[in-house]
């Protein structure tokens, strides 16, 4: 090939010149490979960094903010939670099972790296329509991959969310969020400190897995060539990961590591340089010591390999024997591949030859930073000028169509393939607004909700992103938990297009506004660009994960299946005009996407969240109103509880305006509920009652049985 | 006609199950065991008596459903002609 | 005196802490024992908990049954001390030949994690001794290879000897194909032989109302009641 | 020496995977497909050059670990002599 090596590796000429400037010479091949991967979009965030700085990330309870492998927040009484979200979009399109499986494996190691035991996973997903066989294949494979890895590694998958839209047909989204739990003294950072300390590589043998995959699979868009990129598929080994988790937790518990780092993109290159740079030190690395699966690997291949299930531990020489003993006990392979040295240089030898000698920090700190041009998409004015019609009739038929939608219908086809009970923490399982996990031996419980809404963000990324944060926060609050932290995964198209970058920038601002209004710190996240196929970009799809803390947690916690005949149906929250822009009704019933979503109302939003937290202690059912509006929310409660519901005439059935939730109120608790609400400042109104075996929407009627069957079959009838 | 499809993982792709089985055998004292690789076989009864036509159809089945071409190779053998 | 029970940890086991938590609630001194140990001295009984020992590679339970501790588990079976296998532990006991039959992939090839109903079929086992025949229990199932198989004569023999201890059923206690979550032969969810018992569902996941059910206590209590004081 | 072990489920034991694959193929329009049975193969590299001795050892590995006689049969083939 005539192309210079750096261009083949995806580097621009300017970036190459910058490497030469740093090194004051031409780079060696291994060095160039390292810069090319570490300076890729995926690893360096070169297009997004200038924007991500705008996120609020401080709060008194933040122990570790963005920048480390995971955010860490203080839960009180010595407990810390670690959280992180990641995407594995492109690998999952190439090989859905393994792509999703290794996505789970990767996020678990990010949490483990902080010293925490991973205790739960969530999986926000996007696919094209299930009417298409290939989309079904991808969906089935991804769910099986998450199940296959998560179940076997022994971390429950307790929630997630899903949307189907044709913009994802050629570019599905597979995001995974993980939550970890630890006592304060377990916290570890990824810093190599202490001269003469040793770098011990633990876990899987290194092979030619996904070489260049980080830069190729994650940063380049799909097109006809994707077949050629296939050899870099990585295979997950949950068994190796399980042993690695147990071995590392034992190392942490015994204080045997001074720092630790997982190996992800750019494997050994990234882990050695990052730990050295974080510790303000250098490192001498001997590649001949690395335990290999394939014995004829070159130095660049070893440095770039993305073999899964590996960790790099920094240990004191005096502890080495104990560290190797722990590894041996768990049948985890270990090799001593480096020594921490003063000076800040990363020096790498292979077969007696110097293959790299670079300032460790330059791989991350000197990475390029782009301020890419922004431009508001030209079609927004036209979209906004349409005022979405408020549906007035056919409510019964519309409700059934909505319940039959696989993004609205029963998702237990997914969640029952996942072990969601392990550890006996799950006191509200998947299928409610947020999952609630108790911390045994305490009064504390953690709630997490993940949310995304690509269509609303397409119409207005700023408002759409802000609404997501508000929605996830309310989802958490209806379990009785106060929102305390956010992680975000920003799934976007090609950042080289100014319209996409504008969507990105608006999203960051919208999320930041909502987080500030809620006093919520963003403690971590991930950016996935180039989600496009043949030049068509996905909807801007930020996904947020909000963590909440309930203390003491409600016992029993509110659930969707605890409504009974005779209970009143309340709507808590502001009464505004029905908001149909980007709604499920538009998508499913009208096949349209238009209008401008309502802006959040921070004052109302805060009081409604406060109301939810206090009502969770009083009432059996709280359910936020989101996709499909009040009609769908009430129907879900009715179906899950096995009791009919009557909604009064005149209620906004399908609008998706923010800051609203439903409550089932037993007559004898109405007084307590009103008292509880009083302090929050939120307004409420009785809009119906639970009774009979029908869903009554004003003047229209659907039998509960038909609604339930439709809802239950939405996914199974499509998946066979 | 009886046809056998044997499916193996591509050489460059890691095979954690094979590795674990190899370790299991060595732990039992079978020190002579080197690399171990796992595969799958599918035995199909196919109506039809033109071997070439059947092979073509089975090849198509492999590409469409039976094998995962991203990580697997396959070999088709006629075990018993019609 | 508090009974001491060993909960074995194989590489890949993941329900060990949950079993310890459940046994704790019953006042038992449950302790983790690593699979490389060679002695169960001082324990009155042993539990092989759920998970994915050795990644379930080759066959579920196939490699685990050769772990050093399994010699002791077999000795317990021989001298009549209670041995309980839950889910993956049940699979290991079958592989080890301490229980008849085997477990293969679910009928519809999907992992199943949800509460199901079980009917107690016989009380002559360490798992059901304190329950009553006909009791219906709600307990979570969590497996891909939960489909119990054995030759017809083995199944007949099991039925005859009271070795079938639990069957999948509907909430009303009726056994049917529709109430069989994984295709298990004759809807069998749990079997026993001598002092050894195994079941696919997870009784330790149903030990507190806040977890959705406390019905698992009935089975675990039977196990605890079957322990004789341990000699240390 | 390279040895292949093929493990199949005994006829009397259910084979949900085979049944599902057969149905999947017929759903795709392959009406010629009759019964389908799944098997697994294990490819072993074995040090040793006496085929009989190696066969004996592999047979023992099968009985002890590789196959479960309660539900499975196995066949050993030498693929490549030492
Ligand atoms: N959208 C975002 N919002 C907030 N923080 C982000 C975002 N994207 C990335 N980050 C933070 O940047 C840091 C580096 O991310 P990354 O390079 O993906 O980590 P890793 O190498 O561990 O995979 C992480 O701490 C991550 O939380
Ligand atoms: Mg990381």
Image (spheres, coloured by chain):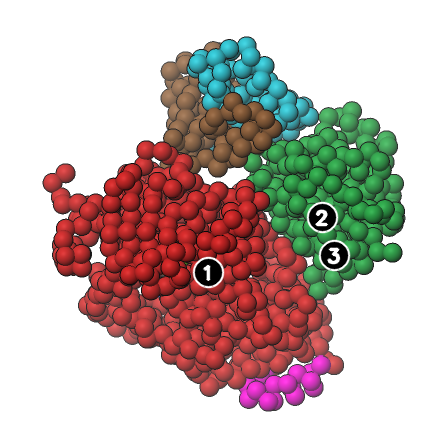
Chain colours: A red, B brown, C green, D cyan
Mark 1 or mark 2, which is nearer to you? 1
> Which contiguous range is marked in magenta?
A669-685
Q: Name the spot of residue C13 as percent of width and height, x first.
A: 62, 46
* Same subunit, tags 3 and 1: no
From the viewer's perspective, tell me whether residue A485 is left or right of residue C47.
left
* Badge number at residue A720: none
| Magenta-colored segment: predominant secondary structure | helix
Q: Earlier in the sequence, mark 3 or mark 2?
A: 2
**Is any part of residue A182 visible from this angle?**
yes
* Badge number at residue A258: 1
Q: Name the spot of residue C84 as percent of width and height, x first.
A: 76, 43
Neighbours of disc 1 within 10 Å: few (<14), some (14-19), many (20+)? many
**Is any part of residue C104 visible from this angle?**
no
From the viewer's perspective, tell me whether residue C57 is left or right of residue D82.
right
What's the residue at 69%, 71% (across, down)? A555
Q: Which chain's residue wears label 2?
A: C
* Badge number at residue C7: 2
Which residue does the numbered mark 3 point to in the structure image?
A: C22
Mark 1 Cβ inside 8 Å of ligand 2: no
Q: Which chain's residue wears label 1?
A: A
Q: Which chain's residue wears label 3?
A: C
Give me the C-alpha separation between circle 1 and circle 2: 32 Å
Residue C153, by quadrant, is top right
Q: Secondary structure at mark 3?
A: helix
């Amino acid at each position: 090939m005539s192309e210079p090596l750096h261009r083949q590796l995806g580097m621009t000429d300017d970036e190459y010149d910058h490497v030469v400037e740093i090194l004051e010479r031409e780079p060696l091949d291994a060095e160039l490979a390292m810069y090319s991967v570490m300076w890729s979009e995926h690893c360096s965030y070169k297009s997004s960094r200038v924007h991500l700085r705008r996120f609020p990330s401080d709060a008194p309870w933040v122990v570790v903010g963005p920048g480390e492998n995971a955010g860490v927040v203080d839960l009180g009484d010595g407990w810390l939670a670690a959280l992180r979200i990641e995407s594995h979009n492109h690998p999952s399109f190439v090989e859905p099972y393994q792509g999703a499986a290794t996505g789970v494996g990767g996020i678990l190691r990010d949490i483990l790296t902080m010293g925490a035991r991973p205790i739960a996973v969530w999986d926000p997903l996007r696919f094209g329509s299930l009417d298409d066989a290939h989309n079904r294949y991808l969906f089935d494979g991804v769910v099986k991959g998450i199940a296959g890895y998560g179940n076997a590694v022994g971390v429950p998958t307790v929630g997630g969310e899903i949307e189907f839209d044709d913009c994802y047909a050629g570019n599905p989204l597979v995001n995974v969020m993980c939550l970890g739990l630890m006592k304060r003294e377990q916290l570890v950072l990824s810093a190599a400190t202490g001269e003469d300390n040793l770098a011990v590589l633990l876990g899987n043998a290194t092979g030619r897995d996904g070489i260049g995959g980080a830069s190729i699979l994650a940063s380049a868009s799909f097109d006809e060539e994707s077949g050629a990129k296939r050899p870099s598929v990585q295979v997950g080994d949950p068994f190796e990961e399980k042993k690695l988790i147990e071995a590392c937790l034992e190392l942490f518990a015994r204080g045997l590591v001074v720092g630790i780092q997982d190996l992800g993109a750019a494997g050994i290159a990234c882990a050695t340089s990052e730990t050295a740079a974080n510790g303000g030190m250098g490192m001498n690395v001997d590649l001949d010591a690395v335990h290999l699966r394939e014995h004829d690997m070159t130095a660049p291949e070893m440095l770039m390999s993305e073999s899964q299930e590996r960790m790099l531990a920094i240990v004191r020489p005096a502890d080495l024997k104990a560290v190797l003993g722990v590894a041996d006990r768990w049948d985890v392979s270990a090799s001593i591949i480096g020594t921490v040295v003063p000076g800040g240089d990363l020096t790498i030898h292979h077969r007696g030859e110097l293959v790299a000698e670079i300032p460790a920090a330059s791989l991350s700190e000197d990475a390029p930073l782009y301020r890419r041009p922004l431009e508001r998409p030209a079609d927004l004015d036209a979209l906004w000028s349409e005022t979405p019609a408020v549906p007035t009739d056919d409510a019964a038929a519309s409700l059934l169509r909505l319940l039959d939608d696989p993004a609205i219908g029963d998702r237990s086809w997914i969640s029952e393939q996942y072990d969601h009970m392990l550890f006996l923490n799950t006191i509200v399982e998947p299928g409610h607004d947020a999952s609630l996990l108790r911390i045994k031996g305490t009064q504390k419980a953690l709630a997490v909700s993940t949310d995304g809404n690509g269509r609303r963000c397409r119409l207005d990324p700023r408002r759409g992103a802000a609404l997501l944060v508000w929605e996830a926060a309310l989802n958490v609050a209806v379990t009785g938990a106060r929102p305390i932290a956010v992680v975000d995964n920003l799934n976007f198209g090609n950042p080289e297009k100014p319209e996409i970058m504008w969507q990105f920038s608006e999203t960051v601002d919208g999320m930041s506004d909502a987080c500030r209004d809620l006093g919520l710190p963003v403690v971590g996240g991930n950016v996935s660009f180039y989600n496009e196929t043949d030049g068509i970009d996905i909807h801007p799809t930020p996904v947020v994960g909000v963590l909440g803390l309930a203390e003491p947690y409600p016992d029993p916690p509110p659930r969707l299946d605890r409504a009974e005949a005779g209970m009143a149906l309340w709507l808590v929250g502001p009464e505004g005009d029905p908001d149909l822009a980007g709604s499920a009704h538009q998508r499913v019933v009208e096949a349209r996407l238009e209008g401008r979503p309502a802006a959040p109302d921070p004052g109302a939003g805060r009081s409604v969240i406060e109301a939810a937290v206090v009502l969770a202690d009083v009432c059996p059912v709280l359910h936020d109103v989101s996709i499909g509006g009040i009609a769908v929310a009430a129907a879900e409660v009715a179906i899950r509880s096995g009791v009919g519901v009557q909604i009064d005439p005149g209620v906004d059935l399908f609008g998706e305006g923010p800051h609203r939730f439903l409550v089932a109120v037993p007559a004898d608790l109405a007084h307590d509920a009103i008292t509880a609400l009083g302090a929050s400042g939120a307004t409420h109104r009785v809009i119906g009652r639970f009774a009979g075996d029908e869903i009554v929407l004003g003047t229209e009627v659907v039998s509960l049985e038909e609604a339930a069957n439709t809802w239950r079959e939405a996914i199974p009838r499509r998946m066979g | 006609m009886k046809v056998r499809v044997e499916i193996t993982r591509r050489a460059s792709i890691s095979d954690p199950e094979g590795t674990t089985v190899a370790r299991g055998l060595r732990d039992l004292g079978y020190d002579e065991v080197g690399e171990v690789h796992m595969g799958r076989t599918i035995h199909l009864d196919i109506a039809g008596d033109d071997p070439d036509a059947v092979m073509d159809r089975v090849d198509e089945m492999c590409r469409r459903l039976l094998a995962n071409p991203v990580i697997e190779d396959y070999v088709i053998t006629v075990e018993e002609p019609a | 005196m508090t009974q001491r029970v060993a909960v074995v940890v194989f590489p890949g086991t993941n329900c060990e802490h949950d079993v310890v938590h459940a046994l704790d609630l019953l006042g038992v001194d449950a302790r983790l024992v690593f699979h490389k140990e060679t002695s169960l001295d001082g324990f009155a009984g042993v539990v092989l908990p759920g998970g994915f020992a050795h990644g379930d590679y080759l066959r579920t339970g196939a490699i685990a049954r050769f772990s050093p501790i399994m010699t002791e588990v077999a000795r317990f079976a021989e001298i009549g001390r209670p041995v309980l296998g839950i889910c993956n532990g049940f699979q290991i006991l079958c592989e080890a030949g301490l229980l008849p039959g085997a477990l293969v992939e679910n009928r519809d090839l999907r992992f199943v994690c949800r509460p199901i109903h079980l009917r107690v079929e016989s009380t002559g086992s360490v798992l059901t001794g304190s329950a009553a025949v006909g009791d219906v229990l709600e307990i979570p199932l969590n497996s891909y290879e939960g489909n119990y198989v054995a030759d017809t004569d083995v199944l007949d023999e099991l039925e005859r000897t009271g070795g079938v201890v639990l069957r999948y059923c509907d909430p009303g206690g009726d056994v049917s194909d529709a109430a069989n979550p994984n295709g298990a032969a004759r809807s069998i969810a749990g079997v026993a032989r001598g002092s050894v018992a195994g079941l696919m569902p997870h009784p330790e996941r149903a030990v507190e109302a806040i977890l959705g059910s406390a019905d698992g206590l009935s089975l675990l209590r039977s196990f605890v009641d079957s322990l004789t004081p341990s000699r240390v």
